[in-house]
Amino acid sequence: MSRLSHSEIHMVHRIGWLRAAVLGANDGLVSTASLVVGVAAAGSGRPEILIAGLAGLVAGSMSMAAGEYVSVSSQTDAEQADIARETRELQDAPGAELEELTQIYVARGLDEALARQVAIRLTETDALGAHARDELGISETATAHPIQAAIVSAATFAVGAAIPLIIAALVPVAQITLIVAATTLFALSVLGGLGASVGGAGIVKGAVRVTFWGALAMAATAAVGMLFGVTVG
């Protein structure tokens, strides 16, 4: 069998968009469900609950998009600055850079002669790529994509946020708090387990930690809603 026919897809190849998608959906589900539960616990009617939830969906989606874009753009700027500096160093001191690359491979277990041979060969082939990968830890599979992260975060936040909104629109007003909370906890456990599975982590551990923090968030907002509902009432 040809070696070219053996194709491997590792988790790191999709970690950028996967991270943004999982975080976006989790945040959308938890924050909007918490908002709905809090407003409902205050004794508000269905229109007020849905308006608050919809406003949270829109605001949260935009916030997630802006946050991811700024965060990932900062990472991209740092990577580009490091690569620019490495490019200058390769031009100004190629010998020192070759020695630096050699010592990197020595530290990874190669003997001096073999490490230098590998460093020379990689330098001849793609010096900047070798230093970016082995010295800076930057590779194509891990390169940040700001626009992609922003779009995925906003979209998945909206999808997650839509779940408690749909539930709040369909169930009796008196049961919104209970049913939204229960549905959200179930959805969080599924989402947490799925995210952990796709990312190569333990399913149960991923489901438990997401569900725990979601329950804590809804409990806190429900307490605030009941407190202010009693105070205002």
Image (tube, rainbow, N blue to C red):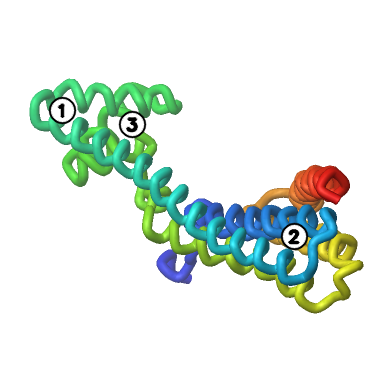
Q: Mark on residue 89?
A: 1
User: Which numbered disc, 2 or 1, marks the residue that appears first in the sequence?
Assistant: 2
Q: Is residue 215 left or right of residue 118?
A: right
Please identify the quarter of the rendering in which residue 109 is found. Answer: top left
Q: Nearer the viewer, residue 222 or 62?
A: 222
| Residue at the (44%, 57%) spot, across then down | 150
Badge 2 element: helix
Which amino acid lies under the numbered mark 2 shown in the image of this protein? Answer: Val
- Rendered position, 4 above or below 74: below
| Outermost residue to the front | 233
Q: Mark on residue 36?
A: 2
- Disc 3 designates what residue? 135
Q: Is residue 11 visible?
A: no
Q: Nearer the viewer, residue 123 or 121?
A: 123
Label 3–label 1 contact, CB within 8 A: no
Cα separation, mark 2 vs mark 1, equals 56 Å
Badge 3 element: loop
Please identify the quarter of the rendering in which residue 78 is found. Answer: top left
Which amino acid lies under the numbered mark 1 shown in the image of this protein? Answer: Glu
Label 2–label 1 contact, CB within 8 A: no
- Rendered position, 177 above or below 205: below
